[in-house]
Image (cartoon, rainbow, N blue to C red):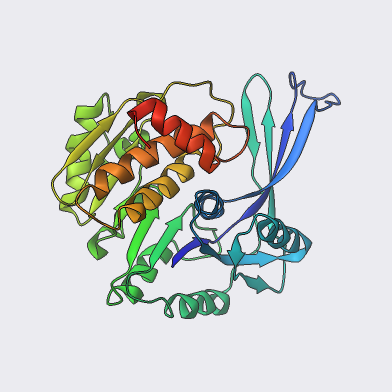
Amino acid sequence: MIYTVSFNPSLDYVQDLDCVNLGYVNRTSGEKILPGGKGINVSMVLKNLGFENQALGFTAGFTGEVLKSMLKAKGVESDFIELDAGMTRINVKIRAKEETEINGQGPKISADALELLYQKLETLQEGDILVLAGSIPESMPQSAYMDIMKRLQDKKLKIVVDATRDLLVNVLPYKPFMIKPNNFELGEIFGVEIKDKDDVCKYAKKLQEQGARNVLVSMAGDGAVLLAEDGSEYRAEAPKGTVKNSVGAGDSMVAGFIAGYLITDGGADAYRNAFEMGVCTGSASAFSEELATKEEVEGLYVKTFGKK
């Protein structure tokens, strides 16, 4: 079973405008509300690709109820811990000449609520996949990802971590199955400027040396790189298409990687397939108004790599 954790999920209120005039009334040309949060995005794309999974984390208030009902409508199973105070945040995403985001704070998560989540995670079984994605709310210890991996280190899980800087670096001693920094985040970790795929491979290798089994690095329009635990290295240019929505592309890459790996059941060509599937799924979401569908991913896969 696949599980995703979103400590601070959201409702994303997406507004389309021709332009934004500060200090004046602005009217939208289109709008929609979507479930949001990096783990939530991974769950929705996995479901789109045909993989059952369960979304874990915290919700609160009426917005939390809306979030759960929207996920249910999309066929995504969830088992959130409901908090007594606050509300699941609303993130406003303004798409005009430039994209602007105003992200809500979200509810405070107590130590008792966090312990309830830890107890849920301790029921996971050998072979399960756990995705830890996104930032940690200020009300929580910034060691939360590391604490989870430490508690689960004897369970033989495949844990995927998509986080930045210390959140990512601190989990490396616990040998995550896969980590996915982008090229800018990779540069921040080592205090360098990443200029090309050779630089990516050089510094991704350092993350492997520190404990990561597989390092997948997204580079937006410049493609992606994977350093796999079997010593193989994969590089790809970005598929061609018109970017319509950058939100969730990285999360979609994570979902595609997991799907591609599972399709081959960890076989000899598992990492190549996982990498190619990840690249196509991330790009398919970027080329779509919402998150990628299975049909969009399959079509882009054939177009990019010449096979299904």
Percent position of residue 94, x then y: 69, 31
Q: Residue at x 51, y 55 (%)?
A: 39
Whether residue 189 is visible here, answered yes or no, is no
Percent position of residue 121, x then y: 45, 75
Percent position of residue 218, x then y: 36, 36
Q: Is residue 39 left or right of residue 236?
A: right
Q: Nearer the viewer, residue 53 or 220?
A: 53
Q: Within the image, what quadrant is residue 153 found in?
A: bottom left
Q: Locate the N terminus and report the quarter of the image it occupies.
A: bottom left
Q: Is residue 181 left or right of residue 44?
A: left
Whether residue 93 is visible here, answered yes or no, is yes
Q: Residue at x 59, y 65 (%)?
A: 77
Q: Locate the C terminus and report the quarter of the image it occupies.
A: top left
Where is 73 relative to 20, above or below?
Answer: below
What is the residue that sits farthest to the left in this orientation? 231
Q: Residue at x 56, y 80 (%)?
A: 112
Q: Nearer the viewer, residue 38 or 252?
A: 252
Q: Residue at x 47, y 45 (%)?
A: 251
Where is 289 relative to 156, above or below?
Answer: above
Percent position of residue 95, x then y: 67, 28
Q: Total marks drawn?
A: 0
